[in-house]
Amino acid sequence: MADLATTDTAPVDPANWTCPAPLRDQPVVVMGHGGGGALSAELIEQVFAPAYGNPTLAALTDSAVLGLGGTRLAFSTDSYVVRPLFFPGGSLGDLAVNGTVNDLAMSGARPTHLSAAFILEEGVELAVVERVARALGDAARAAGVTIATGDTKVVESGHGDGVYVTTAGVGLVPEGVDIRPQRARPGDAVLVSGPIGQHGVAVLSVREGLEFGVEITSDTAPLADLVAAMLAVTPDLHVLRDPTRGGLGASLNEIARASGTGVRLRERAVPVPDEVANACGFLGLDPLYVANEGRLVAFVPPEHAEAVLAAMRAHPQGTGAALIGECVAEHPGMVVVATGLGGTRVLDLPLGEQLPRIC
């Protein structure tokens, strides 16, 4: 914030103060409200949750688990506004499938069907729309889901950004599976399925025309098969979360706060690719807050942790899986990082998003 010092002739006028982060009592929507951090949480808690007000929504999980006709269904929806539409390793079409498939998988569900709604800006080339649609269809087939319904709307030129996509999905939750952030317990092992930070840096590199000596590709991928392999070891997985907006740091904070437990993270155990670490160092970013689109974090009872980790490493989407910390009774609702230098630091919920428009 601006220097607060005053002089005899020129007192500081608070109206001229500037701050790099949006104020918490912001009367209008700012980009940080879509970043998956504290501003997003406040928007949900203060605007949407009171307006909708029901126990199913109150759980605030990535997908709702519903009992219908004796069947347990997971149901989720998400919108995708990534810029640019195409980036190394993926595209808007891939994200629109994998993001919703993964939200369903984080409840332990086997995704089955999706809807796809396109909002097109007048003037966008049909070849671009077709390319996005084909990528979406290919990703759906790779994930083993069916695009069962959809919609298309067109807005005037200047009132969109080419193509936006919203997908909703359903999946079947196996009997005996109860995965939600409130189930985290002290002693749980905290596992991550692979290296973090690749998606956010890949999108940023193309958007800003940055070169880091090597091409960094997005990790976007469907995770339902990986989750199935983990559940085959034990159905008693306590928590799963895909660390998208706000990255691993935001996801761990959300789990800690929902469960009333603490998380102790070992910084050197977190797999960060050298190219991501170098890019983040150059740009002043923390890789723990950079978005991922093909990774998950799991809280697993300690007696099952070794076997679950082995199953993850045996799966193509989990070859880089690692044990990165544990759930603790101390400092409830907080995430504490043991640094490589022997100290500790608090990993707080980010205010907004380091990299907006990444999904």
Image (cartoon, rainbow, N blue to C red):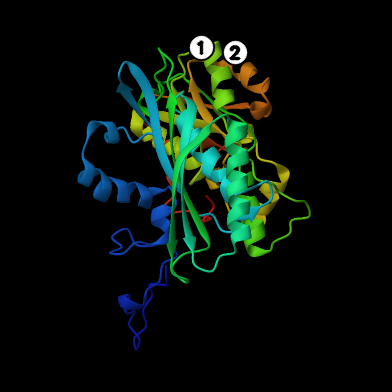
Q: Which residue is mark 1?
A: 234
Q: Are dots 2 and 1 in contact, CB under 8 Å?
A: yes
Q: Is residue 176 above or below residue 198?
A: above
Kindly identify the residue that appears in the image at 31 percent across and 51 percent down.
Answer: 43
Query: Does any portion of residue 191 appear in the rendered image?
Result: yes
Which quadrant would residue 104 be assigned to in this image? top left
> Tag 1's secondary structure?
loop
Q: Is residue 128 above or below residue 57?
A: below
Please tell me which residue lies in front, 260 or 319: 319
Q: Is residue 57 above or below residue 310?
A: below
Kindly identify the residue that appears in the image at 43 percent across and 47 percent down.
Answer: 36
- Residue 165 in percent (x, y) is at 48, 51
- Residue 141 in percent (x, y) is at 60, 34
Q: Give the residue type at disc 2.
A: Ala
> Tag 2's secondary structure?
helix
Closer to the N terminus: mark 2 or mark 1?
A: 1
